[in-house]
């Protein structure tokens, strides 16, 4: 029996390949199927099943394309209603894979259909659980993504999750391995570990949600406290996973088309395409196509696209680091942005050589910021980190304006003002600056190096407060002020 975790850092997502006697299962695959096809061919295995732990909200799964190419059966747990063929497994049902067996454990709570797959080895011994978003390492899945107004609340789902953990998972042996769908960085939980697997016994000792003496009421209160609003694309991705989507191969072929500067410009004009510049922020600010939005491919690219670009069907053209154009198209498709119409062939160099206009964003050091603050030259200083980051410590004159909520908060800003923008390291602030420039703000100044640089400078700061000690009511008040 072979078990392999396939971890994708930019989404903090884990898919799994399990094989026994030449038969294979893939759990929670990403959108692109070719890596899985190549894996099967290399191993000489036949894909029998594609297991889905639940309707994912943070990415579009590859279950449909993979099933179409391999003939494998898609398997969900109880209550998963879809608009495509699949096997809806019953709670307690067993599915054979070679000499191994999977037992279906219906574990609602993160979502109503959430299911854990218990793998038993050739001897029949419980070996591992694939928990999806039910149980993470150090955390559990947030219970507010599948709530329905007037029907099921996040408190209801949290209660279901408590029962699922106590009745289905915690009774299993301590040596059983826990394989979750996500690690640190995912918005599907609050405080996940950077570890991507653990034993159940260690989680019983260290995971707050598995505390043996925790009452149901305490559990509900704890897992529902401090939840940030989910990114706007989550519900849309979940719907694609339920209803279906277009072929990824077609998306890649269309999106990876090379466009000359003139053709690129024509697509922008005729299709109303968004120009997405995915180069590094240090390069972007020195020269970019006017109206471009910066979201660098080397940061948490797909989640930021999903949070900020409201329309999944938005036509997009890309400026990418040379040789990484297909990667950009792929990572957009992973979160449901399938309408990529090509990339700028030759990059900004070709655009400049064609005599076309470039824009820039001023970027200054933290030391220069300190000088301007002392001179009284800084009137509007935006810290675009999350409220909890800001509350832990910030520059005294900085106002919290989280990038996450820019689309709902633009009315707070005046295009006539000059804004100094800072995040933690420079990635988010450059996204913010590019959006402001694209929306007609002429005077935007980025703080190079972000808070890390400001912290070491002479800029006046508030006293440091450990984020874990910030009272919940203070966090809630800060959230109310920025949303």
Image (tube, rainbow, N blue to C red):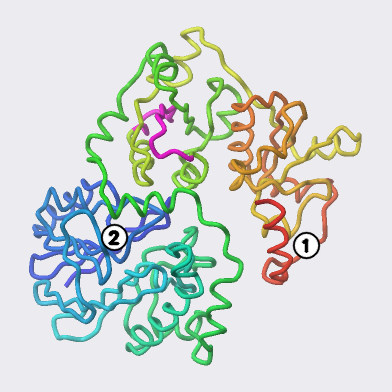
In-front residue for pair 27/240:
240
Tag 1 secondary structure:
loop
Task: Decide: is 266 above or below 81.
Answer: above
In the picture, residue 406 is in which quadrant? top right
Q: Quadrant of residue 121?
A: bottom left
The residue segment tinted magenta is: 310-325
Distance of label 2 from label 1 (alpha carbons): 41 Å
In the image, taking residue 343 as reference, residue 301 lies left or right, namely: right
Residue extending furthest right?
A: 375
Q: Position of residue 185 (x, y in %)?
A: 49, 58
On screen, residue 23 above or below 318: below
Q: Dot 1 surroundings within 10 Å: few (below 14), some, or many (20 or more)?
A: few
The dominant secondary structure in magenta is loop
Residue 226 in the magenta stretch? The answer is no
Circles 2 and 1, Cβ within 8 Å, touching? The answer is: no
The residue closer to the viewer here, 120 or 239, is 239
Residue at the spot of label 2: 28
Q: Is residue 312 magenta?
A: yes
Q: Which residue is mark 1?
A: 464
Q: Is residue 225 above or below residue 9?
A: below
* Residue 123, position as x, y percentages in the image: 14, 85
- Return the x and y of residue 272 as percentages of the image width and height: 44, 23
Quarter the N terminus occupies: bottom left
- Which residue is drawn at the image coordinates 17% and 49% (left, top)? 38
| Horizontal side, residue 56 vs residue 222: left or right | left
Q: Position of residue 153 (x, y in %)?
A: 48, 70
- Which of the 4 quarters of the picture holds residue 160? bottom left
In this rendering, position of residue 445 left or right of residue 340: right
Residue drawn at point x = 50 percent, y = 38 percent: 296
């Amino acid at each position: 029996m072979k078990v392999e975790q396939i971890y994708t850092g930019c989404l903090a997502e884990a898919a799994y390949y399990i094989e026994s006697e030449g038969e294979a299962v893939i759990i929670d695959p990403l959108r692109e199927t070719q890596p899985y096809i190549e894996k099967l061919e290399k191993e000489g295995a036949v894909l029998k099943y594609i297991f889905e732990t639940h309707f994912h909200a943070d990415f579009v799964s590859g279950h449909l394309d993979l099933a179409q190419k391999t003939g494998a059966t898609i398997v969900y747990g109880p209550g998963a209603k879809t608009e495509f063929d699949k096997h809806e497994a019953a709670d307690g049902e067993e599915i054979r894979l070679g000499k191994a067996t999977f037992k279906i454990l219906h574990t609602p709570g993160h979502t109503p259909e959430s299911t854990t797959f218990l793998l038993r080895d050739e001897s029949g011994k419980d070996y591992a659980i694939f928990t999806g978003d039910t149980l993470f390492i150090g955390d559990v899945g947030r219970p507010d993504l599948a709530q329905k107004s007037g029907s099921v609340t996040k408190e209801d789902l949290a209660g279901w999750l408590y029962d699922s953990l106590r009745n289905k998972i915690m009774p299993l042996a301590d040596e059983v391995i826990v394989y979750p769908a996500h690690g640190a960085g995912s918005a599907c939980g609050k405080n996940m570990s950077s570890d991507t697997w653990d034993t159940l016994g260690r989680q019983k000792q260290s995971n707050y949600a598995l505390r043996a003496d925790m009452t149901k009421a305490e559990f509900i209160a704890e897992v529902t406290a401090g939840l940030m609003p989910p990114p706007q694309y989550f519900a849309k991705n979940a719907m694609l996973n339920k209803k279906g989507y277009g072929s990824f191969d077609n998306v890649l072929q269309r999106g990876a088309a090379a466009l000359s500067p003139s053709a690129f410009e024509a697509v922008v004009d005729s299709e109303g395409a968004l120009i997405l510049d995915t180069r590094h922020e240090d390069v972007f600010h020195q020269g970019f196509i006017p109206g471009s939005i910066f979201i660098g491919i080397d940061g948490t690219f797909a989640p930021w696209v999903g949070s900020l670009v409201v329309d999944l069907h938005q036509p997009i053209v890309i400026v990418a680091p040379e040789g990484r154009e297909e990667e950009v198209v792929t990572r957009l498709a992973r979160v449901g942005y399938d309408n990529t119409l090509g990339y700028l062939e030759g990059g900004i160099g070709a655009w400049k050589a064609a005599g076309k206009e470039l824009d820039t964003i001023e970027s200054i050091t933290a030391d220069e910021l300190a000088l301007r603050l002392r001179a009284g030259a800084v009137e509007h200083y935006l810290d675009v980190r999350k409220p909890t980051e800001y509350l832990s410590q910030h520059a005294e004159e900085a106002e919290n304006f989280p990038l996450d909520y820019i689309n709902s908060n633009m009315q707070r800003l005046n295009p006539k003002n000059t804004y100094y923008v800072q995040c933690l390291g420079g990635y988010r602030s450059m996204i913010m600056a590019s959006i402001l420039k694209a929306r007609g703000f002429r005077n935007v100044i980025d703080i190079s190096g972000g808070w890390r640089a400001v912290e070491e400078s002479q800029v006046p700061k508030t006293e440091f407060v450990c984020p874990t000690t910030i009272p919940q009511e203070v966090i809630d008040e800060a959230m109310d002020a920025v949303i």
